[in-house]
Amino acid sequence: MKIPEARVPVLLVHGIRASATMWRHQEQTLRAAGYPVLAIDLPGHGKRMGESFTVPTALAAIDDGAAHLGGRVLLVGLSLGGYYAMAYAAQHPDRVAGLVAAGCSAVPKGVLLEGYRVLARMIHRLPDRGLWLHETMARRLLPPAGARDVLAGGAALDVMDAGLRATSTLTPLASLAAYPGPIWLVNGALDHFRLNERRFLAACRNGEVVVVPGATHLSSLAQPERFTTILLRVAGQVSAA
C-alpha cells in the first residue's frame, strides 16, 4: 500500500504596504488541498502597523512563522516578501524545504530603487499620505476579489521609506547562490521587476523561472487562479521530495 506523502507547510510573506490578507485566495485553496499554511504580517504592516521595519525584525517575523508551522516550510514571498524570503533561506537553509520568490527578480539598488523611494516620499506628503491613491490603484489594477483581499489588512503608508531603505542593503543574488534547495522564480509576464531575471536564475543552484501569463507585478492578486495552480504544483513537488 502506498503511504500518502506528508504535505509541506507553506509560509506566505506579503509585499510592501500590504499584509497577510493579500494571500486569502492562496490560503483557502492550499488549506483545502491539505497543506498547513500561514500568512504572516511583517513589521509595520497589517496587525503590526506602527512597528519598526528593519532587516532583523523582518527576518525574525519569518522565523517565527516557520517555527509556528513546525520549523521547515515551503517559503513563498512576493515583492518585498520575496527579497526577505531569499535572505532568510540563505541564512536558514535547514528551515526552508523550497523557496518561491515572486515578483522580485530585480536587484534592489540603483535607479529603480531610488526612483521608487523618491516617488514614495512625494506620495507620503499628500494630506492623506497616499491612502486614496493606494486604494484607487488597487481597485483599478486588480480584479475585485484581489482588490478586496489586498485592502482588507489596511495600507501600511508609513513603512515605505524604511522598508525600501532596509531592502537596499540585501544581496539577493548572493542569497540565491547560498541556498542549496529548490527555487522557483515566479514572475508576472508584465512585471517590471523581471529586470534581472536571467541573473537571478543563473545565481540559483537549483532554480526555475515560472511566468504567470497576463499577470502584472502582484501576480498572486492579478491572476490568483494561475498563481495558486503554480503553488500547488510546487508544494506537491517539495512534499514528494
Image (tube, grey):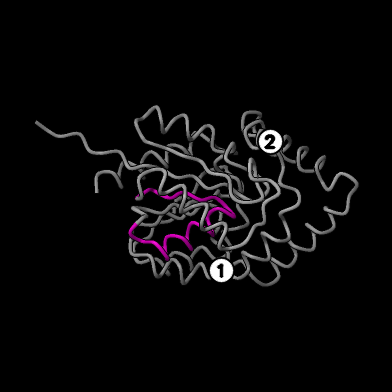
Q: Which secondary structure, mark 1?
A: loop
Image quadrant holding the N terminus, namely top left
- Tell me the amino acid under the disc marked 2: Leu
Q: Residue at x 48, y 63 (%)?
A: 87
Q: Which residue is mark 1?
A: 170
Q: Where is residue 152? Give x, y as percent.
A: 66, 33
Local SS, label 2: helix
Q: Quadrant of residue 168?
A: bottom right
Q: Which residues are magenta?
A: 72-94
Taking depth in this image into account, of 106 and 54 the one nearest to the observer is 54
**Does residue 1 show up magenta in the picture?**
no
Query: Circle 2 sits on which residue?
Result: 151
In the image, taking residue 193 as reference, residue 136 lies left or right, namely: right
Q: Position of residue 62 (x, y in %)?
A: 49, 52
Residue at 36%, 30% in the rendered image = 33
Relative height, residue 143 to residue 191 (above, below): above
Check the image and name the residue furthest to the left. Answer: 1
**Magenta-span inclusion, residue 78:** yes
Question: What residue is rendered at 55% in x and 53% in y?
Answer: 81
